[in-house]
Amino acid sequence: MTLALALLLATVAAPPAHAQTQMEAAPLVTPFSTGKPGAAPPAPWGPVQISANKTPTEYRLVTDQGMIVLNARADAAASGLGHPVAFDVHSAPMLEWRWKVSKLIEAADNSDATKEDSPARIILEFDGNKSKLPFKDRAFFALGKSLAGHDVPYATLMYVWTTRGAVNAVIPNPRTSRVQMIAAASGAAGIGAWQTVKRNVVEDFRRAYGEDPGQLMAVGVLTDTDNTGASVEAWYGDIRFLPASP
C-alpha cells in the first residue's frame, strides 16, 4: 500500500459533517454492538475506498456468541472502515479491542510491499507538525492531498495480525516512514477464537516514531488481501480507549 494507502488515510481522517471537531475528555468510538445484525455499522463509521480499481472488502454486522460484532470478508480485496475522532490519547492511552480471524494469509509479508496484506488491522491516525519532516515525506503528503482532496495524517499507527514474526515488533511500512505497524498478534496461535488485545498507544507511538503522539484524528479497521489475492474472514468487537492503570 503506497499511494493507495495515502488515499485511504486521507479519506478516513476527513471529518464528515457530523464528526467530532473538538478535543474530547475521552474518545467516543461508536461500538459495533449498538448496531443491528445485517445492517451497516453505526454512524459515524463509514466505508473507505482505497482505489476504484480494487475490489472492496465486505463489512457487515453479525451476531457471534451472542454479541453484535463487525464481520469482514476479503477475496483479493481491500477497503476499510473509518471513524473520525478528535482526541488527546494521553488522557486515555490504553486501547482495547477484540478480534478474530479465520486463518492466516500464508503468502503475506508486511515488510514486503508486494505482499503487504493482513487479515485484521486496527488503524490510528494522528495529527502533527508536517513542516519538520524530510522533503520525501512532505511530497508524499502533497501528492496524497492532491488526489484525495484531504490532508493525509501526519502519522499512522497500525496494529496488525501478521503471518510470522515476533509479537510486539515494530514493522515499518515498506513504502513510507509515516506509516508504522505493530504486530499485535502473529502466527497461528488463537486462529478461529476471539482474542482480546490491550495496548498503550502512547508507548507504542513513541517506540514507532521516537516522539509523543499528537491529536488522534481517526480510528479505522482494515482487512485486506489485494496484494496476495487470498481470501480471509475477520471479526472485530468494540474498540475503546481507557485511562492508564494507576
Image: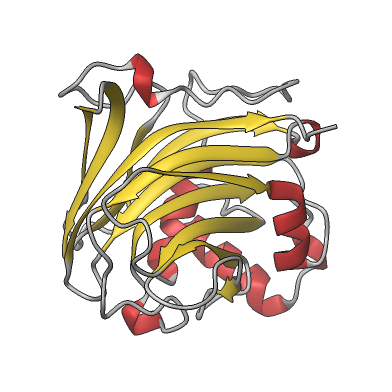
Q: Is residue 79 left or right of residue 17?
A: left
Q: Residue at x 34, y 67 (%)?
A: 188
Image-based side of 186 in relation to 202, left or right: left
Colour scheme of the rendered structure: secondary structure
**110 or 78: nearer the viewer:** 110
Could you tell me residue 200's position as x and y percent? Answer: 70, 47
Q: Position of residue 32 (x, y in %)?
A: 37, 25
Name the residue nearer the viewer: 114 or 181: 181
Task: Identify the residue at image location x=70%, y=57%.
Answer: 204
Q: Which residue is drawn at the image coordinates 49% and 78% (left, top)?
A: 165
Is residue 185 something that shows in the picture?
A: yes
Residue 75: give x, y in percent of width and height.
14, 60
Residue 36, how many percent across, how many down? 24, 16
Q: Nearer the viewer, residue 133 or 85?
A: 85
- Viewport quadrant of the N terminus: bottom left
Residue at the spot 20% in from the left edge and 58% down from the top edge: 232
Inspect this view and state whether residue 80 appears.
no
> Which quarter of the rendered picture does the C terminus lie within?
top right
Residue 107, relative to residue 49: is it above or below?
below
Image quadrant where residue 154 sits: bottom right
